[in-house]
Amino acid sequence: MSTLKFLIFHILFFLISSILWVHAQDVQKPVELEKIIVTPGRFTIYDGATPQISLSKQEIERFPLIDNDIMRSGHVFPGVIASDYSARFSVRGGEKDGVAVRLDGMELYNPYHLQDFGGAVSLVGLGLIQRSDLLMGGFPAEYGQKMSGVFDISTKMPNTEKVSANFGLDLINATAMVEGPLTEKGGWLLSARRGYVDIILTLMDIDEKYKPQYADVYGKLVYQLTDADTLTFNGLYGWDKNRIRIEDVDNNLDSQYDNTTAWLKWRHTFGTSHWTDIYLFAGTSSQERTTRETNFDNRDFRFIGTKAELTANVFEKHTIRSGIEWRWLTAQYEYDVSERIAGINNYKHIMADIDDNGNDIKFFLQDEWQIHPKLAVNVGGRYVVQNYRRPDVQNYEIGPRVAIAVRPKENLVFRGAWGIYHQPVDLMSVPVEDGIQTVGLAEQSTHYILGGEYSRNNFLIKLEGYYKTFDNLVGRLREFGRQTQIFTSPKSAEATGFDVFATQAVSSRLTWGLGYAYGIAEEISGNTTIYRQYDRRHSIFLSSSQQITSTWHLYVSWRFHTGDPRTPLIHELIDDGTACNRQFGETHSDRLPPYHSLNFRITKRSPYKRWTLTWYFQILNLYNHTNVDQYAFSEVLDEETGAIVECTIEEEPQFPIVPTLGMTITF
């Protein structure tokens, strides 16, 4: 079927389905049901009264986190794999780029600042958040494009009663947010943030010369056209500029990133149980990156599109969701990089010059059926077609998904899920770093999930096991730095493990939490099976949250995990003493030392007549344990002659002890 015929067919299908479901709503009275949550692997952060499986935004604001980052808040959940330096994370043995980030229904492209450092800060500030769901496996068909997880964020509604302002200052950012009413039918919100890491580094006496700069702006406007129609406009812009060791010919970096996404949503409700969401969206992303003066990586992306989604509660027990999306993309790549590999002054040279455009069409349909108060199922599937793939591969994928939940008792639920998840390589994600210049089959993962959840008297425990396979794997994220990176090109992989999450509200003032994860992740590289980079055998997270008084709060947490895989390094001075011979051992045959860190945060809220001051003091890595991020090649030079004296392997540490003071003023 041609792309045009496919698009026409599904538009007609969507319209006919809408008419039928609206008719069903007219002829029967909706019935409110006590629904079972079917989706496994779900954790929620939200602003409001706390259900037991969730964490409130107020709790997250009290976590000891760098920059109060909403993405870093996901690091506390079992099965999440992350480092101190990055807001990015992976889940259950997958890659970091396998987690989708959605904001108010729109999937964001690469929403991170400081991308040359692994994405240290996300583009979305915690103060904007109303609710956030982290889905780590077995998620339904409405979520697509990524094969490991989904971080689904909903922003707060603007203040429609009065103009209010919020100003915040912490270790690395200054933030301002203003919101207010828009006539009697809506409201607006505007937030801006500027990182000042560059200013801090200028004041510090360090040998390295870094100058990272970044800023972002977010705006939201909501307008109620009628009782049944609401328009919402969102806009997000992020900007980065990094200048690192410019005078060092072998290790310099000069880069700039721009990222813009804007979208308009029209929601129309039919009664109280049916609604449609229609989106118009567009965005741009550009990157100009130069290293070692002669290496450059320039990218320029543009996209526009529309999508329509329908939600209908019909026949008393069915929640049906359907959607179709069309997106047009254009991409230009100018890539010319020499990567240093093993040996004496050994480099691998990769070039790519791409100028292409094309269309993506995506369709999903799912039905969550509450068969019985003790039984529910979710059945659905996704269809993706791309017209710019290589002619020797099929240009579409179909991904069926099914989940089931059984509640034998009121406080006990068992869940299971199976599904095929595709992560298409689109024009904005061609892995040119690996010498690939065309788009082929989508990466694919199959999930098998089984678990249970028990809650009673403010106590919750959740256990979930998983087995995942990965196929058609291509590409890896590159991160700038002195760290040694070993890139394999696996075609397939698998991950097995289980997670345990427990929490209890001992009283209205004291809550504790425990997370434990066990996992094995392996991949096939050539004819050899090796551990994946995100194979993390044991992880533990302990926390205690105490409301000391009505205005004072104390949060203490301890994190531990066994060492991640590493490749042994050999660094020897050659006979004439003019160079070092860099050699890699067997890939991922060794491990880093175990990681552990004790963190605490104390928060004070001081309300006044017209404004409120909230400040916090926190210390990360309280006992200053040296956690190793990676081992790196290093050369010891003679200060007078500049000749190489010794070739060494040095530890690249993660955060040392980090005290932080921050405050927020709300008017």
Image: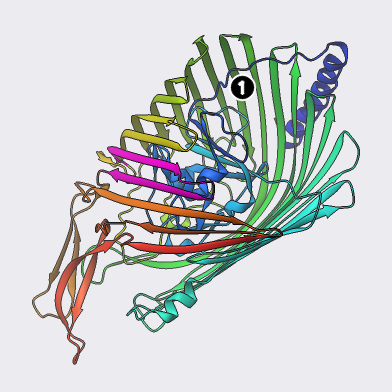
For label 1, count other residues whose C-alpha is less than 10 Å away and answer few (under 14), some (14-19) or many (20+). Answer: many
Question: Label 1 belongs to which residue?
Answer: 380
Q: Which residue occupies 46% across, 21% down?
A: 455
Residue 14 position, x and y percent, is: 78, 27
Quadrant in the rendering for residue 655: bottom left
Residue 572 against residue 80 in the figure, above or below: below
Q: Is residue 441 visible?
A: yes
The N terminus is located in which quarter? top right
Q: Which residue occupies 44% across, 42% down?
A: 546
Residue 530 against residue 432 in the figure, above or below: above
Front-most of residues 146 and 208: 208
Looking at the rendering, the stretch of residues picked out in magenta corresponds to 535-561
Q: Which residue occupies 75% across, 22% down?
A: 312
The C terminus is located in which quarter? bottom right
Residue 596 position, x and y percent, is: 27, 49
Residue 626 position, x and y percent, is: 24, 59
